[in-house]
Structure formats: structure tokens, C-alpha cells
Amino acid sequence: MKLHLSLTVAILASLIQYSKQQCIADMVFMIDSSINTVDNVYNALDSFITRQPISSSEIRVGAVFFSDQVIGSIPISDNVDNLRRQLSNNRIPLGSRLRYSVGIRAANTLFNIENRFVPRVAVLVTSSQAEYESNLFDIVSQLKSSNIGGRSMTVYSLGVARNNLQNYNLNELNIIATGNAIQVSSSVNVRAEFERIASTVCSNNVVTTAPVCSDFDLQNGVGYKANPKDCKRFIQCEKEAFSTNIIYNDMACNDGLFWNQELKNCVHFPGSDCYRGECDGTTYLYGSVKCGAYFNCTNGVVNSGCCPESAPEFDSVTKKCIVSSNCIFQCTLNNKISYAACQETFKIYRMPNDVIDPCRYEVHEGEGLTKSVKVMHCAAGTNFNPSKCDCSIRNKDPCTGSTPVNPCSEDFYLNFTDDRILDNSVSKAWIRNEGPVSVSGERATFDGTTRLAVLRYSNIDFVLPLAIKVKFRETSSQSNMAVLYTPSVYITAGNGRVTIGVETVIGGYNSSAATVGTNQWKEVVLYYDGTTLSGVVRSLDFNGFNIISSTPIPTKTVSFDDTVKKIQTADGALQIGSLIGGNYPAFVGDIDEVKLWKGCQVVRRPEDF
């Protein structure tokens, strides 16, 4: 398969008005450990990592090492030094037996752990004859299309000659790579092929502006809209960094869910835009991404089902379970749904205080070194059903009624530890580095053209109370520079003054206070509880470690009748530094730390954050 912007480009190609090249992808190298020239392959990958532009906004790299089992892995990362260190630690003994499906499954797991909405490219490097797998094509096809997050996996395969002899099976490599099989005459040429594949990724990853997305779809650079051809998918629109160009990304809802444009969320079928009463007073069946599973919608209520072992594949055309040798998915016992297997993957989510959160669940993926646990949210209006391993309980326990996870733990925590740009909270939000922002001494420097963007906070309901704390120093005398900004919440600073602000459902409110000036570290806290906006600004010492003085930011009353006024929901990323679609000048200076709390009922004053 050729790498492109997934389904939407093909569907909407006639609408494209503009395109440019942008190099961004996650690449996983699947190294056959039975290669007797494995050192040369490792050296090629090491050289590729050092020569290729690798960052969170460009190509990121991971690797798996396998024979007939996974021997080692390197999680996908943009940290070059860490990648090289782990690569050195994984120079493993040669294996003997080889199964290609093992490597592809392991690569698929690494992609799904990261769950980024970028092209996913797997590169198999082999010099050996693998064990025969009769269902290899079916396994590979299913894995290529089963990635979480709406991105399929593109596979390249490199057959490396050994002593000028072809020991691999070219037909199998073509099955795996679907036309992307490459024959390499010697392992010394492998690095050049890695770079050629990366170049192909860059040239085929087309960024477009088109009527698919327009400025009317965006707020602060981000927006969401329905896919006109597929209700199981939706389109994310966003402004290209520091440009008027609009990028659109075709994304998939989670298995069994459909898009609702009003909610801008994926929901069960009866609540979707494409629902036309198919299961009002009757039963309607539709398929899962897993070949042996389906969904049963009866009288507007959705439940999951599994085909029996005697007919293991669900046919979406006839809407029946059929006899098939192509489906390897098993989840049934005596024609009844068996939940034991799914309960090993999908589990209830218990908060640290041992209270169950009904609106979230755990996904346990991978094995051994690639094992991971992710916390996922159910669709709006649904709770997790542990007996059926899905979010099929409707309108029972609202999310807002559940006890928060450690009431005052951060929902977002960025502190640039080890000079890395990572969210250290339990949310693990993806942070896009645009410009890029440089990081040194565990502090980030913004020059007025760079920014960090956190798309997780687009179209989000800021559960109240909301608190945000930022530690920074401006190095420009410009006023009202945007230190942190969303369409609904912002902190600006400059020329000896800081301002905090919120946009609520009844209007905008802000408050400001004097503070120390240019090149001096300070810490600002914004606090909004639904009735008042308040804050504090702290002057710090030369190193930014100790508090010298603290000044309250005057309280602004928002609600005079004590009714909670929610923060306005808006389509826009949380931006740190330079803005897209904002009304304030870009920030010039250094940022040491950003923290955000939602729903903290224990701490009720800005002075306590």
C-alpha cells in the first residue's frame, strides 16, 4: 500500500486546492535477529537515527527484535540519545527460528501504545527463510488495518542478501509489504534504504488545504467535522504551524462507535448523525473491526456479540456468522459470549482511592517488554460494562458524579525533565513541538515564532474548579504576551504585568496585577470555580527556585447568584507560546513548568496551588 492521508484524500481528492510536503510519521523497524550480519543492520539503524531529523513534529523511531518470539523492543521516541542507548543494549545473540507475524504484531503494539494521529510505517529487515505460516496474509492484513486511532499501518520489507545469496522468500516479503518489498544486495546498503523509505514517507505525506476544512470550522487553529462518506470516521481540521494553510486528518472512531457532529464525539449508533431508526423497535447488526465480533442494536440499546467457533467470522453483508478459515479471532464458547478473554484486555478502572470510575476503563495491551496499560474514556452518555467489556451501560452513573483520581493530582504536568517535552501527569497528553521550541537545562525557550500545542484540550469540558500554574520569565518588554492560551482560558504577561482570563457561557472575564519585570522568574496561578476568577503571582529568585514575594490577583466575580457559570467549550488546542488564531503577541522568554488541575475539590484557593 502507498502511504497517504488515509481514506479522506481518496474520497475528497476532487476538492483539493493546495498541497505541500511535510515529513511526519512514526517508524518501527522490525529486525530479524536470525540475520548473521545483524551487526551491520544495527549499525545502519544507528546511523539512520543520527542522520535523520527526529523530533516530535517530524519522524519518531522505535524497534522490535524478534525470531519466533519478541526478544527485545525500543518504544517509539524522538530522544536520539535514548534511542541509540537502547539500540546498543539490544545487540542480542542470533536467533534460529523465524516467524514474520511475531515482528509485525510487536510493531502494531508499539504503534497502538503511542496512539498518535500520524502515518505509521513498519520496516521489516530480514535475511532468512521464515517458518511457513499458512495464514500469513490474513494475519498481516488484519494487523495493518487494526491500529487504534484511525491510522492504518504501512509495511516495507527489506530482503538483505547474505554472501550474495538470496536466503529469504521474496513472495512472502511481497505479501507482508503489499508491493513495498525491497531487495538489498548487501547489509552495508541497508542505511541508504532506510533513508529512501523515510524520504518516501515525507513525499507521500501530503498536507492539504481545501474546502474540506475552512476557517469557519476552526477556533484557535483546531476543529472537527463529520466525514461525508463514512459515519464511523471524522475529520480533524487544524492550521498548519505559522501558516494560513489548513491541514485535515481523517480519523476513525473507536470500534463500534459513530460520529455525532453536535457533540463532536464518537457515540453508539443510535446517537450518531447517520442513524435513521435502524433499530427502533427492532434489531440491527453491524460489524466490528475484529472479524469474529459484531454489535447488536435492539430498541436503541447496543450490545456486543461474538460469533461461535463453528462459524467464527461475521459477514457484514449478510449480517450472519459464517464458516471461514480467514478469521483467527475467537471469543465464544458454546454459542454464548465468553467474556474471560476480553476481561484480560478490558478492565474496570479503579482510582487510587479504590473507587471505580464508571466512565473510564483500562486497556491492557502487548506482552512482556511491550506490555502496557492505557486508561480510556467511554463515549458521552455511557458507562463501562465489565460483564461485556464495552461501554454499553447508558445513563446510569454520570462522569461528573464519580470521585476524581486523587482529587488534586495534575491533569497536565509539563516540567521538561531530562530536557524532554512530555506530559508527566496520568493523562500523558501528546504535546506537539512547532518551530521547534528548544529545551536546555530542563527549561524551554520561546523566540516568538515557536510554540507547544496540546490538542487534548480542544473541545474539552473544563471540569470546575480549574487551576493552572505557569512558571516563566519573559525576555522581551512586549506587553500582553500569550504565555498560555486556549479560546476559553489564558494567561498573558509582559512589561511588569500579568493577566488571567476565562471565557464563560455568559461572557469573558479577566483580572490583572503588577509583577516583576523582564528577565525575572515568576509563577502565576489562575483559579476559576464557576462563580469567581482569582489568582496569585509570585516573584521568584534569580534561579527561579524560591519564592521572594506573593501578590494576589484581584478577584473577579462572574456569578452574582451563586450559580456555576461553566467555561465555554471551544475548538482550540492549549497553546504555550506563539498563537494561531489568538489576539495576543507571541511569548518571548523561558518556561520552566506548566501544571493544570481539573475538578480539585480539596484545594479551594489559588494561594494553595
Image (cartoon, rainbow, N blue to C red):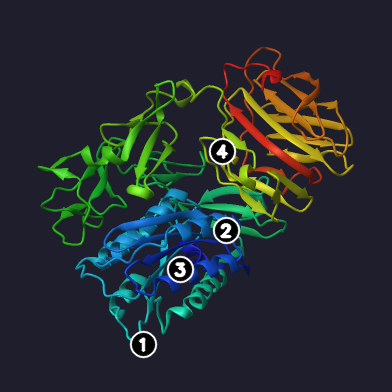
User: Mark 3 vs mark 1: which is more N-terminal?
Assistant: 3
Q: Tell me the CA gap for discs 4 and 2.
A: 20 Å
The answer to which image quadrant residue 229 occupies is: bottom left
Q: Tell me the CA gap for discs 3 and 2.
A: 15 Å
Which is nearer the eye, 432 or 73? 73
- Marking on residue 407: none
Q: Residue at 61% of width from left, 17% of height from top?
A: 603
The answer to which image quadrant residue 341 occupies is: top left
Q: Tell me the CA gap for discs 3 and 1.
A: 20 Å
Q: Which residue is mark 1?
A: 164
Q: Secondary structure at mark 4?
A: loop
Q: Tell me the CA gap for discs 3 and 4.
A: 31 Å
Number of the front mark, 1 or 4? 1
Q: Which residue type carries mark 4?
A: Asn
Q: Which residue is mark 3?
A: 42
Q: Which residue is mark 4?
A: 424
Q: How many marks?
A: 4
* Left or right for 363, reference 419: left
Is the residue 401 above or below the residue 181 in the image? above
Q: Tell me the CA gap for discs 1 and 4.
A: 49 Å
User: Mark 2 vs mark 1: which is more N-terminal?
Assistant: 2
User: Mark 3 vs mark 4: which is more N-terminal?
Assistant: 3
Q: Which residue type carries mark 1?
A: Asn
Find residue 449 and report its horizontal and vertical position in percent.
77, 53
